[in-house]
Image: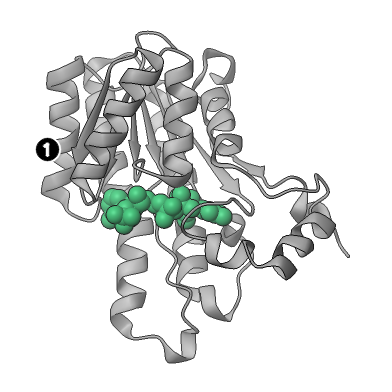
């Protein structure tokens, strides 16, 4: 991964941060693009210190087209090009659909789906212009296929994101750019900690997940490193489920 430049959105913490660490551990240059500029800069500084690799933190709300364009432009000005984009930024408000304010629905779709459109289109144009291919990875969710009453907005956004990934794969293959998704199962981050740290829910995971544990952000990061590697050059348009076997189990 040396010489590769990786942009990861929403990477100041959680799955994005775990993914940033996995790429930096392989010697990649990582751009942490996150809503929270200070947190993005602090995380980039930590990466550079810990792994001795170049890293840059940029404040960027993925729903804002101008900010996305500025983020990709600054990446190119600083490091010369973009090899990999990881569309990771996402939210899950956990509100029952029948009580949900329309603004919450709108924001979930804006961040999880529209944000990935902006980042993919802008980064892919850069990759096409350079002419050396690229990799785009979409962090979806098991909710790309299944959902529940308090995740209808989330499921709609992630199902849409999966199809956006498939569609971009058809549009970008001719340029040597692959597009794939990773669907995480239950991963311990600030998004889900409130739920999985309750003893009864922790016990459920142990029993229900064949691997017998909750996932960690690095479990997703390792899959992302593979999909970004030369070994994955002929893989495009698929979802890799990283859930410890959870969704294969019928009981
Ligand atoms: P997290 O811990 O809440 O981290 C998400 C990061 O994204 C935060 O740094 C957040 O910044 C940032 N972010 C939010 N909105 C943004 C925006 N508009 N533009 C740029 N950055 C933004 O969540 P996570 O669990 O790591 O989730 C990462 C991705 O994995 C999401 O797409 C999520 O849907 C997906 N996922 C997670 C799980 C799980 O079990 N955790 C399972 C399946 C899929 P602020 O904190 O400043 O808002």
Look at the picture and state if 209 lies above or below 24: below
- Callout 1 secondary element: helix
Q: Position of residue 122 (x, y in %)?
A: 22, 37
Residue placed farthest to the right in the image? 251
Q: Position of residue 199 (x, y in %)?
A: 71, 66
Asked where in the image residue 207 lies, by quadrant, the reply is: bottom right
Look at the picture and state if 173 lies above or below 63: above
* Labels in figure, total: 1
Asked where in the image residue 49 lies, by quadrant, the reply is: top left
Q: Position of residue 23 (x, y in %)?
A: 45, 23
Q: Is residue 36 visible?
A: yes
Q: Position of residue 209 (x, y in %)?
A: 79, 53
Look at the picture and state if 187 lies above or below 70: below
The residue located at (47%, 59%) in the rendering is 191
Look at the picture and state if 6 lies above or below 95: above
**Looking at the figure, which quarter contains the N terminus?**
top left
The residue located at (25%, 50%) in the rendering is 62
The residue located at (21%, 21%) in the rendering is 129
Q: Which residue is mark 1?
A: 70
Q: Is residue 176 left or right of residue 33?
A: right
- Observer-nearest of 135 and 13: 13
């Amino acid at each position: 991964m040396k010489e590769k430049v990786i942009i990861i959105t929403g990477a100041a913490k959680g799955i994005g941060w775990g993914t940033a660490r996995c790429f930096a551990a392989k010697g990649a240059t990582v751009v942490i693009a996150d809503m929270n500029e200070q947190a993005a800069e602090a995380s980039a500084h930590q990466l550079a210190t810990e792994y001795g690799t170049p890293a840059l933190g940029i404040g960027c709300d993925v729903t804002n087209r101008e900010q996305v364009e500025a983020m990709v432009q600054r990446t190119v000005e600083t490091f010369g090009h973009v090899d990999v984009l990881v569309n990771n930024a996402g939210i899950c408000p956990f509100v029952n659909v029948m009580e949900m304010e329309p603004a919450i629905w709108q924001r979930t779709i804006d961040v999880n789906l529209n944000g990935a459109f902006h980042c993919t289109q802008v980064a892919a144009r850069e990759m096409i212009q350079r002419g050396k291919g690229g990799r785009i990875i979409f962090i979806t969710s098991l909710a790309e296929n299944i959902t529940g009453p308090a995740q209808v907005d989330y499921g709609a956004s992630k199902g849409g994101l999966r199809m956006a990934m498939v569609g971009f794969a058809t549009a970008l293959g001719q340029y040597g750019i692959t597009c794939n998704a990773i669907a995480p199962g239950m991963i311990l981050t600030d998004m889900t900690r409130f739920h999985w740290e309750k003893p009864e829910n922790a016990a459920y995971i142990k029993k229900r997940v064949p691997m017998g544990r909750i996932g960690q952000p690095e479990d997703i990061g390792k899959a992302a490193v593979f999909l970004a590697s030369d070994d994955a050059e002929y893989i495009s348009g698929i979802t890799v489920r990283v859930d410890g076997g959870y969704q294969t189990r019928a009981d």
